[in-house]
Image: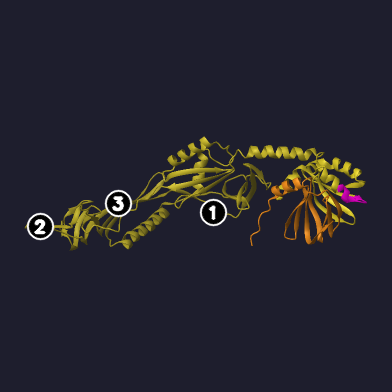
Chain colours: A yellow, B orange
Amino acid sequence: MLFVNFIRWIFGYSDICIIGKFPERFLTVSAKNGLNLWNLKSADGRIHARIKTERINTAIKFALKSECELEIIKKHGLPYFCGKYKYRIGLLAGLFIGTILSCFLSCFIWNIKINAPDGINEYEIRNELSSLGFHEGIIYNPEEVRSIERKLAILDGRISWVSINVSGTTSNVELSTMMNIKKNTDKKSPVSNLKSTADGTITRIKVRNGNSMVKIGEGVRKGQLLVSGIKEYTDGSSKLSDSEGEIYAKTGRQITLTIPKNTSFIPHEDEYTIKRSFIIFGIPVPITLCGTPSGKNIRIKEQKRMTLLDSDIPIKITEEKYLKYNQQNIKIEKQTAEIILNKRLELYKLFITGNSDTTILSESKQFSEKDNYFSLTVDLVTEENICEKSYVTIIE
Amino acid sequence: MRREKPNIEKGRAIAGILHSFNMTVSDNREIFFEGSKGVLEYNENSVKLNTGRCIVAFSGRGINISRMNEYGLTVSGFITSIEFIM
């Protein structure tokens, strides 16, 4: 019935009223001559009905024939709706231009949604896509999109698979990262050796498990075997074990700390300018009247996308904050540089002694002045545990 | 209880041969009438139809003809009686 009503609305229909002494006669004549009437209602000796608009003239003839009067009360349907606005050229032109514009703008991509997995920044991907020529406002070309997919996968080593799905004017970028092969650290080999982490001379040996391969006073190189997990007996048999122990050695290290003679810093200032604009279909329209301020500025840009009914629309609001700053240059004196570098050295010493079982035996400092910087070279002699566990893989 | 679907085509054919009328009554709310030769009376409470041999009168409350064409008409409303006036 809904569809029938819709068809009637498309072709147009009219509400009519039959007035006369015997309006029933009109119904009889109409029915006999194939005139379709519906929604007939009788009230106060009148009959109200609905009729197809194109059959109105026929109905009038039948009304005259049956000595009745036919009154058209109201006209409904699309032809009347259009007829109402037929002199409004602007509306028609607007409809035409709107349709053309809609078709034209549908050829572009206005929204790019990136579903970035953990470990990949959406902003980075957006920038990479932009550098490849895929940004909001480009004309949709399926071949080009496929090419960009491949280029992005090559450009970003972290990405293993990319898919750009375009639906309407929105493109969804789906990414998949390279599979991280987790090192199997849970299942450790039961056999291990201890190796040296630095060059030095052995001072103390504490081996709890394993076969010590070095002696006190012996010099060792970095990576040299200190304690072996394989113990061989005189009868030719051997025993495998997990080596444990600490081997301390006197090691030397040289560090150089530098500080430039001239440095610059940015003092904090509260003076700033805010510039707002909205971008519609890729065209920026300024909201505030201020321009880009002169002088040295730090620009903080914030962009907000407009949404309508949970879907993005191609309108973005941009806020740019320009913070004014004056860079100040400072010249560092020799004495000040020496104090700063010594403080840094103390911090370094604290770091190496605090984190591990390391003691500083001696140190020799040399402060020097170069063209652009001051430097402090320190030779440190330390005693530290140089053991590093190295597991032995057994292939059965 | 399942109501059987009325065979309208068959009824129409029989009505044509016998020059009689055919009536399909759905509850007391709607009647599809074929073979009417004219509407004699139509108001809110009754509809009288000429069939040639007799007059069929439907009476009730809120009676109206919802559709009418050369094939037949549909009378709807709260029908309380159907009368054959010979």
Reading the image, the residue beneath label 3 is: A254
Q: Which residue is drawn at 34% across and 53% down?
A: A182
Magenta region, residue range: A19-26
In the picture, measured across the screen, residue A343 lies left or right of residue A218, that is right
Judging from the image, what secondary structure is the residue with disc 1 in?
loop
Letter of the chain that mark 2 sits on in the rendering = A
Q: Crowdedness of circle 2 by 10 Å Cα count: few (<14), some, many (20+)?
A: few
Instruction: Mark 2 or mark 3: name the one nearer the start of the chain.
Output: 2
In space, the residues marked 3 and 1 are separated at their CA atoms by 36 Å
Q: Residue A267 carries which label?
A: 1
Q: What amino acid is labelled 2 in the image?
A: Ser
Say which quadrant the C terminus of chain B sits in: bottom right
Q: Quadrant of residue B45?
A: bottom right
Residue indicated by mark 2: A237
- Decide which of tag 2 and tag 1 comes sooner along the chain: 2
| Earlier sequence position, callout 3 versus callout 1 | 3
Type of amino acid under label 3: Gln
Give the residue drawn at x 79%, y 41%.
Answer: A79
Is A355 or A94 nearer to us in this picture?
A94
Q: How crowded is mark 1: few (under 14 residues within 10 Å), some or many (20 or more)?
A: few
